[in-house]
Image (cartoon, rainbow, N blue to C red):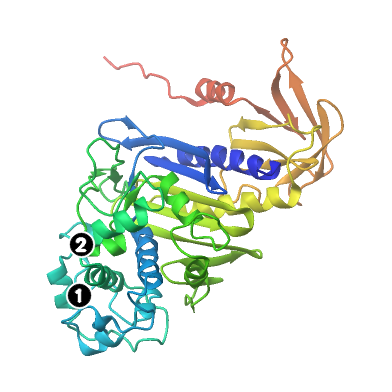
Amino acid sequence: MDRWLRSAIDYIGSWIEFQHRTIQQPGVVVAFVHRGEVVAEHAFGLANLDTGEKLTPRHRFRIASHSKSFTSAGIMKLRELRKLRLDDPVGQYVGGLHPRVAETTIAQLLSHTAGLTRDGADSGQFIDRRPYLSAKELLAELKLPTAIEPGTRFKYSNHGFGLLGLAIEAVAKEPYTAWIKREIIEAAGLRETEPDAPFPKEAPFARGHTRRVPLGERCVIPGDNPTNAMASATGFAATAADTARFFAQLTPSTKKSVLSAASRREMTRHHWRIPQSFEGYYGLGIGIGKLDGWDWFGHGGHFQGYISRTCSIPSCELAISILSNSIDGAAPFWMDGAMQILRVFHSRGAPDRRVRDWTGRWWTIWGATDLVPAGNRVLVANPQLNNPFMDAAEIEVTGRDTGKLAWAAGHSSHGESVRRVRDKRGKVSDIWIAGANVKQEAVVAREIARRYAPRKRRSIP
C-alpha cells in the first residue's frame, strides 16, 4: 500500500471517531478494503443504547438498499449462465403483472427506469407501521400500471427490485434468499452477510435507533424484522468489512470476483443520470459519481434505525464502507469527508520525515484542532467540519519545535509563528499556533470545569 493511502486511512478513522463523539450518535463502524484485503476496521460507540453493548467490527447492520447491488450481481450471474437477457421483458418470467409492467425489461428494472411506483400506495413498511410486503401483496400492487412511461428517466423503485427478486426465484426455481446466499454471498467469500432475517443467534447484531426528536430521547429499534418479498431491495444485513469486500469485487479490474469483467463493467457504467444530482449517475444496481475527477461507485442504505454508505474508488483500489445505527446516522456525510481526506493525501503525499511527529489533536474552549502532517507541510485541520481540510492553514516546520503559518485564510494568522512547548520529560505538552495556545483534551476539560461548571447552590432554610 502506498504510504499516502495509509496516512489517509489512519486520519479518516481518527476523524470519524471525533465526529461520532461530537454529534453523539449511538454507533458507527468503518472498514477499508485495499486490493481485496481488509486493511483497517474501526468501531465506535454502542450496538444497543438500552443494554450498553459495545459496538465491534463484527456487528452486523441492516445495510438496506445495498441489497440492490447484490441482487444486480445475481441477475448478471444468471445472464452469464444464459438463463436470461437484460433486454428480456420481466413478464417473461413473472406472471400476473399489469401489461405495462410486464413489458418493462430486466435492464430497466436494474437501472430504475422501468417507471414503477417507488413503494406503492402505502409505504408503511419503511417506517415500521406494517410488515414488509409478501410476494402475494407485491404482485397485487404490480397489477397496477407503471407510474410513468418506462425508459424516460431515472425513477427509484423498491418495488422494481422486489420484482427482480421474484424473477430470480422463477429462473433459479428456489427462494431468492437461498439462491443469492449460495451463488453470490458465499461465492464471494462473505461470511458475515445474510440476505434477510432471521439472523444467526451467535452473530452480534447492532440494533437501530430513533432520532432524539420528537420524543426527546433515542429509542432502540430492533431492526431484525424480515423483509419478505422486499429482501432483494432492502433485506440484507452485513458487517462493514463484508460490505466493502463485496463492492471491491465489483471493480472491473479486480482479479477476484463472482462476476466476469464484462458484467462488472456493465454494472458500473453510466446508464442514467440521476436528476437534480451533481455528477450522479446510476448503473445496474449501482450508484456512480465523480469527485474532482475521481470516479467512484457504490450504494447507500436507509433502513428504519440505520444509515449506511459504501464507495469503491477504482483508481486507489480501495473500498470504504461506513455503517451507522441510527435513523439520523451521518454515514453519507462521513463518506463525503473521507473522500476529501483521501484527495488531500493523494495530492500532497505521505508526511516527510521532518514533519512526521507534528501530529495530534489539540484543544481550546472553541473545540479541537488536528495537526495533520502531509507532504512537507503540517495541515491545521478542523475535525468539527464535514471536510476537515477546508481552508486548513499550513505550517512550514523550521526547527525541531518551531514553524510558521506559511499559508492561512484571510481571517486567520497567515505568516505568524508556531512553536511547541515540552514538559520536563521532553514530551510536547502544548502548542502555540500564532496567539492561540492549544492543549491536551484533559487539560482543557479541567479548565472548563474550573471556570464554568455550575456550583452547588446553598439551600435556603
Along the line of sight, the residue nearer the viewer: 117 or 77: 77
Type of amino acid under label 2: Pro
Residue drawn at point x = 17 percent, y = 59 percent: 129
Disc number lying in front (2 or 1): 2
Number of other residues with Cα within 10 Å of mark 1, as a class: few under 14, some 14 to 19, many 20 or more: few
Q: In the picture, residue 289 is in which quadrant?
A: bottom right
The image position of residue 277, as x and y in percent, is 51, 72
Along the line of sight, the residue nearer the viewer: 46 or 394: 46
Q: In the picture, residue 44 is in which quadrant?
A: top left
Extreme-right residue of the structure: 398
Please give left or right for residue 366 compared with residue 194 in the image. right
The image position of residue 98, as x and y in percent, is 20, 86
Which circle marks residue 121 in the picture? 1
The image position of residue 163, as x and y in percent, is 26, 73
Q: Earlier in the sequence, mark 2 or mark 1?
A: 1
Q: In the picture, residue 111 is in which quadrant?
A: bottom left
Say whether residue 303 is visible: no
Which circle marks residue 175 in the picture? 2
Extreme-front residue of the structure: 81
Residue drawn at point x = 79 percent, y = 37 percent: 352
Identify the element where label 2 is drawn: loop
Say whether residue 84 is visible: yes
The image position of residue 115, as x and y in percent, is 33, 82
Q: CA distance from mark 2 to mark 1?
A: 26 Å
